[in-house]
Image (tube, helix red, strand yellow):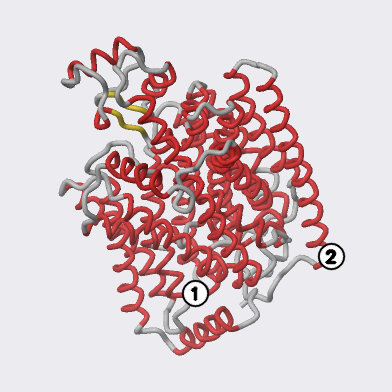
């Protein structure tokens, strides 16, 4: 087992002070710019210009933070110089987690037949808790740069490292696609940009956030993104309260909250939670607990205590912002009913037809772009008079983003909320791109292949991997629109079937190298087979991946335990030493990196 490696304490403090100072400067500049946007709005600038300023400044600020975090040290690039305070790291992880949750906001596009929002929510929160309180602190305590690093350190096996690194890379790439696609979707649908232009802008910003500083850039820009989203989510509620109105939230206006919740539940169209939905919830929980992009902030902290503090910060941030998001969606729901229900389909506000044309809002089951088209669609649906409550449907993203507009608030608030949405999506994309690069460049090219490359070449390889991924995603997504929910479910299923079992086996003293390798292979094969069988049986993609992930997890554990029964005395002794050191020792068991 390698001796621990840490940057010198004085160097770590210098790194932290330098990055903190630059990040604080950029955040202060963004706050001043936000105030100027509000002044521009008051001065009477065109609404389209005011709404676009917020996201533009947000992307520029995140890119600037990434550029200022540039490093040429291995520990800085792959471990964030271990300089991120727990509170910052928690907000960074929560920002990426919020970007991952956006595609699953209820009501889900597609209506009836989709998985239960309750099952999705429970699985998501359980997975976040596992990542924040268990997997993240354990990974940081090990001193490893990646989960594959930890697995290979425990089992001292090249094949285990390669298989775990491939699983990390594939899952991280899928989540990077989710972040880039959702960021481009937010910019194009909410601000009217073309899909190509939005993808290019998001790709360039993600490159700036990721390539220069690696995990340092992803963590510090992710913390800024989390703060931007919190500001955008709370702004409409604070504006309502400042104007003397009540906000539909459990502790502020329970009656309005109940009415809005019932309306959204009706739009969701999901029935009772069945076995398939429970399997999907379990897969989300098991997969998110070891999702590589969510591990980055914990890796960047100064120690296991700081990592636990980061996990607690993540959960508190998620709880507060989830409340703000739910209240903003309730505001939109009630306002939407006031503006649409009881009105004739050809006599609605122009913003309703614009949202309908973008697929964010449906009228009589269609997406008409003009009053005439709306009237025609409703006649064909048998609606001859005013719209009823069952004739209107809105997507979760629209309900979140449109709260300021539907309540007639300042356009600057709409731009601030759109900026926060784009920011958390890019935080997820940056975290995913870095995790992909770390798996490919550090775990496979350097560790598994035994390369003794200089630091500059190692970092160049990592940056090249991230560049190729981001460029490829932008190029392909401009031609083929991915389904972010399916990609997110795939990433969780793959992590649940491979990374989670091998992490559990690493904590079992009697687990062997053969058992770990069997778990990785059996989990991946079973996941693919079970998902294919479920699809052929008529299950939708989300439920099929849920079944595949859970089946893969169980098969991996069974295979790992079965083959570990033949472990020799040397394996058992090494396993006891590792487990005792990781659970009860001072930590930093791995990664003496001579090139750092």
Does residue 281 appear left or right of residue 66 in this picture?
left
Q: Position of residue 250 (x, y in %)?
A: 44, 52
Where on the picture, by quarter, is residue 205?
Answer: top right
Mark 1 or 2: the one toward you: 2
CA separation in Å, label 1 and label 2: 33 Å
Q: Position of residue 217 (x, y in %)?
A: 67, 48
User: Badge 1 local density, few (<14 within 10 Å), some, or many (20+)?
Assistant: many
Q: Position of residue 67 (x, y in %)?
A: 72, 41
Secondary structure found at label 1: helix
Specify the label residue 155 is tagged with.
1
- The answer to which of marks 1 and 2 sits earlier in the sequence is 2
Q: 526 above or below 26?
A: below
Q: Residue at x 53, y 48 (%)?
A: 432
Q: Residue at x 28, y 50 (%)?
A: 116
Task: Depth check: give the residue in front, 43 or 207.
Answer: 43
User: Badge 2 local density, few (<14 within 10 Å), some, or many (20+)?
Assistant: few
Image quarter in which the C terminus is found:
bottom right
Task: Depth check: give the residue in front, 261 or 362.
Answer: 261
Does residue 375 appear left or right of residue 299 in this picture?
left
Specify the label residue 10 is tagged with.
2
Does residue 509 appear left or right of residue 592 in this picture?
left
Q: Position of residue 383 (x, y in %)?
A: 19, 20
Specify the label residue 388 is tagged with.
none
Can the viewer see residue 323? yes
Secondary structure found at label 2: helix
Q: 402 above or below 453?
A: above
Q: 542 above or below 4?
A: above
Image quarter in which the N terminus is found:
bottom right
Q: Residue at x 60, y 24 (%)?
A: 52
Count of residue discs: 2
């Amino acid at each position: 087992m390698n001796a621990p490696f840490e940057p010198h304490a004085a160097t770590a403090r210098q790194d932290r002070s330098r990055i903190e100072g630059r990040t604080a400067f950029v955040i202060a500049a963004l706050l001043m710019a936000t105030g100027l946007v509000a002044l521009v709005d008051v001065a009477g600038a065109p609404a389209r210009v005011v709404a676009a300023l917020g996201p533009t400044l947000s992307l520029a600020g995140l890119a600037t933070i990434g550029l200022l975090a540039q490093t040429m040290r291995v520990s800085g690039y792959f471990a964030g110089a271990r300089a991120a305070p727990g509170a910052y790291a928690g907000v960074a992880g929560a920002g990426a987690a919020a970007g991952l949750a956006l595609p699953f906001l209820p009501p889900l596009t597609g209506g009836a037949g989709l998985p239960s929002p309750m099952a999705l929510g429970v699985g998501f929160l359980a997975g976040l808790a596992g990542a924040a309180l268990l997997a993240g602190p354990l990974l940081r305590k090990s001193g490893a740069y990646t989960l594959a690093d930890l697995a290979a350190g425990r089992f001292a096996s090249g094949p285990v490292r390669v298989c775990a690194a491939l699983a990390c890379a594939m899952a991280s790439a899928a989540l990077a696609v989710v972040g880039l696609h959702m960021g481009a979707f937010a910019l194009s649908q909410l601000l009217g940009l073309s899909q190509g232009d939005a993808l290019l802008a998001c790709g360039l910003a993600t490159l700036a956030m990721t390539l220069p500083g690696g995990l340092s850039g992803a963590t510090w820009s992710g913390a800024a993104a989390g703060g931007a989203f919190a500001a955008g989510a709370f702004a409409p509620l604070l504006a309502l309260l400042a104007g003397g109105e009540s906000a539909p939230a459990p502790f502020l206006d329970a009656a309005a909250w109940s009415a809005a919740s019932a309306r959204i539940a009706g739009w969701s169209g999901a029935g009772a939670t069945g076995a398939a939905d429970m399997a999907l919830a379990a897969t989300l929980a098991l997969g998110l607990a070891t999702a590589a992009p969510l591990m980055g902030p914990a890796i960047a902290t100064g120690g296991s205590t700081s990592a636990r503090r980061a996990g607690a910060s993540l959960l508190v941030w998620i709880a507060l912002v989830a409340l703000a998001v739910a209240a903003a969606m309730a505001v939109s729901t009630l306002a939407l009913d006031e503006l649409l229900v009881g009105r004739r389909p050809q006599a609605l506000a122009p913003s309703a037809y614009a949202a309908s044309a973008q697929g964010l809002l449906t009228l009589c089951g269609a997406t008409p772009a003009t009053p005439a088209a709306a009237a025609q669609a409703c006649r064909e649906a048998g609606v001859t008079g005013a719209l009823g409550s069952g004739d209107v449907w809105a997507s979760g993203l629209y309900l979140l983003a449109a709260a300021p507009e539907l309540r007639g608030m300042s356009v600057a608030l709409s731009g601030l909320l759109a900026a926060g949405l784009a920011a958390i999506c890019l935080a997820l994309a940056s975290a995913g791109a870095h995790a992909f690069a770390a798996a490919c460049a550090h775990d496979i090219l350097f560790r598994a292949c035994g390369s003794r490359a200089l630091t500059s070449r190692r970092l160049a390889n990592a940056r090249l991997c991230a560049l190729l991924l981001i460029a490829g995603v932008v190029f392909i997504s401009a031609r083929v629109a991915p389904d972010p929910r399916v990609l997110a479910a795939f990433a969780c299923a793959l992590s649940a079937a491979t990374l989670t079992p091998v992490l559990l086996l690493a904590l079992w003293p009697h687990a062997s190298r053969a058992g770990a390798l069997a778990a990785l292979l059996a989990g991946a094969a079973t996941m693919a087979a079970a998902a294919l069988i479920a699809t052929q049986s008529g299950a939708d993609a989300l439920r099929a991946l849920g079944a595949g992930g859970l089946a893969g997890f169980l098969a991996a554990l069974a295979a790992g335990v079965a083959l570990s029964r033949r472990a020799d005395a040397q394996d058992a002794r090494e396993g006891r030493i590792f487990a005792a050191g990781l659970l009860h020792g001072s930590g930093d068991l791995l990664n003496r990196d001579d090139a750092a």
